[in-house]
Amino acid sequence: MIFARDLVKRFGDFTAVNGIDVEVAPGEAFGFLGPNGAGKSSTMRMISCVSAPTSGELRILGMDPVRDGTRIRARLGVCPQLDHLDPDLTVRENLTTYARYFGLSRAEGRRRADELLDFVQLRDRAGSMVEPLSGGMKRRLTIARAMINEPDIVLLDEPTTGLDPQARHLLWERLFRLKQRGTTLVLTTHYMDEAEQLCDRLVVMDGGKIVAEGSPRSLIETYSTAEVVELRFPDGLDLNADYAAKMSGIGERVDPLPDRVLLYADDGDAALTEVHRRGLTPSSVLVRRSTLEDVFLHLTGRTLVD
Amino acid sequence: MLTTLAAARSTRATRPGLSTTRVGAVIGRNVGALRSGPSYWIVLVSGFFEPLLYLLSIGVGVGALVGDLTAYGRTMPYAAFVAPAMLAVSAMTGALAETTFNVFFKLKYAKTYEAMLTTPVRPVEIAFGELTWATVRGSLYTAIFLGVMVALGLAPVGGALAAFPATILVSLAFGAVGLTISTLMRGWQDFDLLNTGQFAMFLFSGTFSPVQNYPAWMEVLIQVTPLYHAVELVRGLSLGVYGLGLLGHAAYLLVMLAAGLWFAARRMERLLCP
């Protein structure tokens, strides 16, 4: 569905995407994970054929986005980071108007609009203007809009950023149904739980490059341990580095943070026993499974990027 | 005009041709906006009244003090001199209001075009769609205005019919330039600049007095600006004063249309598809 080799995007002196290789198979849910500024959105814009690659090879649905942009876009559904719904139109008209851009007849546009309004549970708001809708409703409408042309690939740029938990879960559930129908999903996110929920396979991007690739499970296995012990000490603020030094050798890796010490080990309880044996007395302890977040922070570092 | 645009064809284009379906869909979006609420209607209706009020206050009111005026080798009531100019102004303001104010908002704030460009629609099709819509708006104003002129005895029916296509050309030319201006605007403060320019043209382009009344240097300056040509073309046709000069004015407007569209399509491509 998507094939990229050594793909580069530069804006003047700034290199947003610095030579990435990506392949997405039909029916797959593929994720671009990374901090802000990693190059995810630039990559998405190239895939959605609104931004031409600076160099490298890119094929979407077997076609060249520079030459066949119009034809490719006819088969894509794009859900951008900002909703940019049309404020001058009603909820339903946002869909029917969009259908016309794809050359669908008015009758077909109306039919699909009603079907999609049911799908995203907005039927009762069909005649409302866009502005009074909640963030979650707007995002659902944007997703409905992206599906009006029955696309082969749906591109979602940070689909649930800024939504409350209920809205996120509803959205995930709808996206999961889409995936079950065989639609290929490509999404960007910086939420690890989202990537774990939705993606079959993902790449972690940092500084315009791909730093890791695989399924959520395999990434955790490769870049983290099965479990993580989080330890907090009452006087930790200045002494966490000292505590970490005293734990050296336990588990695979020790990571002192300002507020807590992370201990990466395949057996968290055993590691904790060893911590206690060494005479350390943390004020609170949490043994948990390793998540993509651990992988992500390990790979992309802890410094704030912007 | 179409060949010029084919030359402006972008890298994203699949074919040099335009899809009329997609241009139609861009226009259809504005029709939808018109149907959805009263706000657009207010904008639409208010734009019509300004030239009409000028015609009544200055053309008819001041005209009563001025009496008859001799221009183009004939003598006419002052209001009959001013009316065709106000007609050209309606065409200009109708098209400019749409392609500057509305297009700028959609471009910069509503991100309407970004959403359109995730579909098969191309920037040049957006430019064509918006220009067509702006011309419909301008021509709606001029059609009503011509009706008023005929009703007030300021133009013969034949003159009004001859002038109408010219007002369409005026709307197209100003609309195309307006599109380019929108892509160059930095923020709302730039609209003050545009308004000043528009108002200066409105006052001096042979609208309220023949340009020969000004010093020679000013006359030359006026003849460079677009509204002068619009006024002369529309006035010549509505009064029935034909001459080769009219072709020159029409040519000026045609060049303005082609250049405006060409730049607008290019600028939109640059802004929206970086």
Image (cartoon, coloured by chain):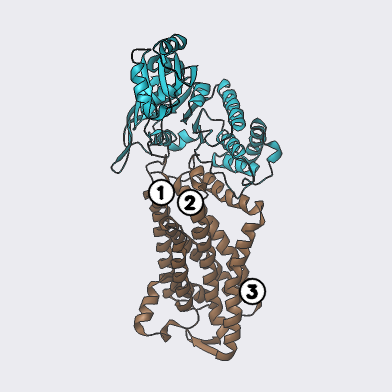
> CA gap, disc 1 to disc 2?
9 Å
The location of residue B123, given as percent across then percent down, is 45, 47
- The correct choice, above or below, for A289 with respect to B72 in the image is above
Task: List the residue tagged with mark 2.
Answer: B107
Numbered mark located on residue B148 in the image:
3
Please tell me whether residue B267 is drawn above or below residue A167 in the rendered image.
Answer: below
Chain of the residue under the numbered disc 3 shown in the image? B
Contact (CB < 8 A) between labels 3 and 2? no
Find numbered disc 3 in the image and state the secondary structure of the residue it sits on.
helix
Q: In the image as oriented, which residue stretches furthest toward the right?
A: A124
Q: In this rendering, is residue B28 above or below B14?
A: below
Q: Is residue A49 left or right of residue A84?
A: left
Dot 1 or dot 2: first in sequence order is 2
> Which-is-in-front pick, marks 3 and 2?
2
* Chain of the residue where label 2 is placed in the rendered structure: B
Colour in which the image shows chain A: cyan
The chain coloured brown in the image? B
